[in-house]
């Protein structure tokens, strides 16, 4: 992938999948509704392609969703393609600044002036030239998030329909959101359509008539969400080093995105002061990118200082290897901060806190490791300071895990406090966060009740048929 990025715009291989496999989960009525929508979309596109343009093919929720959704779209007979832009380090520093700004935070507090704009445009001009070589009039191009937003004008010049899909946002604007939107507005204001995860994420100047709300979804058959036996969960986690085990690999392979079997071969890089957590110890887990807004360090502090040590629980924070995420230059800095704060913990507490960097060379293998870790968790947390939509929350919901999360962004559309999980109104309130974790660790019936309700809601609202149906309606138009 890295070599391809240096050579130019990279196309990601997507294998077609038949969405009919969802019928066993969603029932015949929902399946029939999806198939009608897919047929209408195919007719409306009339042989044209749907091209998705993003900043990376791995390491984040957008990449995970595209891989599965486009596979189903291809399975419906639509030519769906996925292109990844190239960019240098400074380009991704700029776009991370915009990303943080849309969430209402300063990020690295760097400039977004004329020099940054010139560099942003220069990088995307090169990508745009390559994109134009494969575009046809009447194609539909979905441009995902700030990184490739500057391609809008080039796409429109080719006679293609442009949809700008924003996966991030903040309900209440502030100085930083206004600065970020001011930077982006010239590039996206002429898009034919806008898609947001929540209506409140759209800035005031976006035309409501061109705005669509489409929450994300998960694929229940992916390596991250497919069923995994208790035995194989323990074998997988013991083998990669996330649990104390004998090191034997799991006997049953995971399913790759192309349907072929895969094996977990790599180990997780773990920072810990003692042995891995015992298999019978309650394990609190947060799986996130090493991103300031995911507040991994705050999760660690809340667990260390506000969860009763007498419960014998351990905490595992797992993110992707910091050198594996091309479009996130802050990852190493965030991880280093977590390490520094981990080293400052008292030794007795530090022995129950584990920082893990998972291998990213094989995205399906990483997904299988995540699947096992989430399924083993006694409590899954997502203490984000801001969140467009918590895919890790929906993944945990699907696995019937009890969840403690922040009441921010799209998470409040996923979980009703006290019904499918516990929400913390103020993400900075570490005492309340720790108390919620402790409540679930002490009250097994409540944990099971919340987990079961979470699974039911994930099945009803956050599977791919609903997501694909909404996109089909977008393609068909009014």
Image (cartoon, helix red, strand yellow):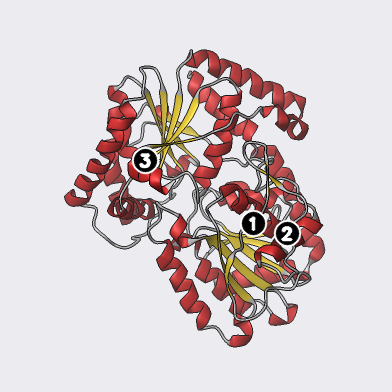
Mark 3 or 2 closer to N-term?
3
Please, is residue 128 above or below residue 92 in the view?
Answer: above
Task: Name the residue carrying label 1.
Answer: 265
Mark 3 or 1 closer to N-term?
3
Q: Nearer the viewer, mark 3 or mark 2?
A: 2
Q: Nearer the viewer, mark 3 or mark 1?
A: 1
Say what secondary structure mark 3 lies in.
Answer: loop
In this rendering, would 72 be left or right of 398? left
Mark 3: give few (<14), some (14-19) or many (20+) Cα within 10 Å.
Answer: many
Q: Are marks 3 and 2 in contact (CB under 8 Å)?
A: no
In this rendering, would 200 be left or right of 452? left
Q: Residue at x 40, y 67 (%)?
A: 333
Q: Give the number of the disc on residue 249.
A: 2
Residue 215 in sight in this render: no
Mark 2 or 1 closer to N-term?
2
In x, y percent, where is residue 137? 35, 17
Please, is residue 417 above or below residue 133 in the view?
Answer: below
Q: How many numbered marks are there?
A: 3
Q: Are marks 2 and 1 in contact (CB under 8 Å)?
A: yes
Mark 2: give few (<14), some (14-19) or many (20+) Cα within 10 Å.
Answer: some
In x, y percent, where is residue 27? 76, 29
Q: Residue at x 32, y 25 (%)?
A: 133
- How far apart marks 3 and 2 lie (CA) works out to 36 Å
Task: Name the residue carrying label 3.
Answer: 85
In x, y percent, where is residue 266? 61, 59
Say what secondary structure mark 2 lies in.
Answer: loop
Q: Are marks 3 and 1 in contact (CB under 8 Å)?
A: no
């Amino acid at each position: 992938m890295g070599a391809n990025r240096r050579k130019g715009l990279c196309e990601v291989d997507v294998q077609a999948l038949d969405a009919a496999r969802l019928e066993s989960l969603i029932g015949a009525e929902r399946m029939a509704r999806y198939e009608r929508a897919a047929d209408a979309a195919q007719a409306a596109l009339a042989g044209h392609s749907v091209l998705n343009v993003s900043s990376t093919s791995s390491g984040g929720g957008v990449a995970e969703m595209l891989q599965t959704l486009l596979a189903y779209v291809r399975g419906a007979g639509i030519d769906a393609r996925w292109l990844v832009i190239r960019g240098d380090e400074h380009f991704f520093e700029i776009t991370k600044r915009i990303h943080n700004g849309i969430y209402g935070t300063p990020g690295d507090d760097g400039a977004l002036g004329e020099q940054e704009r010139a560099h942003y445009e220069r990088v995307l001009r090169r990508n745009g030239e390559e994109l134009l070589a494969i575009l046809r009039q009447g194609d539909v191009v979905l441009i995902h998030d700030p990184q490739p937003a500057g391609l809008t004008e080039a796409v429109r010049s080719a006679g293609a329909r442009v949809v700008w899909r924003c996966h991030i946002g903040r309900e209440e604007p502030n100085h930083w959101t206004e600065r970020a939107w001011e930077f982006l507005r010239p590039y996206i204001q002429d898009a034919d359509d806008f898609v947001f995860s929540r209506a409140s994420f759209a800035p005031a100047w976006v035309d409501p008539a061109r705005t669509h709300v489409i929450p994300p979804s998960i694929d229940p058959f992916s390596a991250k969400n497919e069923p995994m036996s208790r035995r194989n969960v323990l074998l997988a986690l013991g083998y990669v080093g996330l649990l104390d085990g004998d090191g034997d690999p799991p006997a049953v392979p995971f399913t790759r995105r192309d349907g072929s079997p895969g094996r977990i071969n790599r180990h997780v890089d773990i920072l810990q002061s003692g042995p891995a957590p015992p298999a019978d110890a309650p394990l609190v887990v947060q799986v996130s990118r090493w991103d300031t807004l995911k507040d991994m360090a705050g999760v660690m502090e809340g667990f260390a200082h506000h969860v009763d040590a007498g419960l014998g629980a351990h905490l595992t924070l797992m993110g992707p290897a910091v050198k594996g995420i091309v479009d996130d230059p802050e990852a190493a800095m965030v991880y280093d901060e977590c390490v520094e704060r981990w080293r400052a913990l008292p030794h007795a507490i530090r022995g129950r806190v584990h920082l893990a960097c998972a291998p990213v060379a094989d995205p399906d293998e990483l997904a299988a490791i995540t699947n096992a870790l989430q399924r083993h968790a006694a409590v899954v947390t997502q203490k984000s300071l801001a969140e467009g939509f918590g895919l890790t929350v929906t993944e945990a919901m699907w696995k019937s895990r009890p969840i403690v999360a922040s009441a921010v962004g799209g998470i409040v559309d996923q979980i009703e406090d006290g019904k499918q999980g516990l929400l913390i109104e103020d993400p900075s309130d570490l005492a309340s966060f720790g108390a919620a974790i402790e409540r679930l660790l002490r009250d097994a019936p409540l944990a099971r009740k919340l987990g079961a309700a979470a699974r039911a809601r994930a099945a009803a609202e956050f599977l791919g048929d609903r997501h694909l149906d909404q996109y089909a309606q977008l393609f068909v138009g009014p």
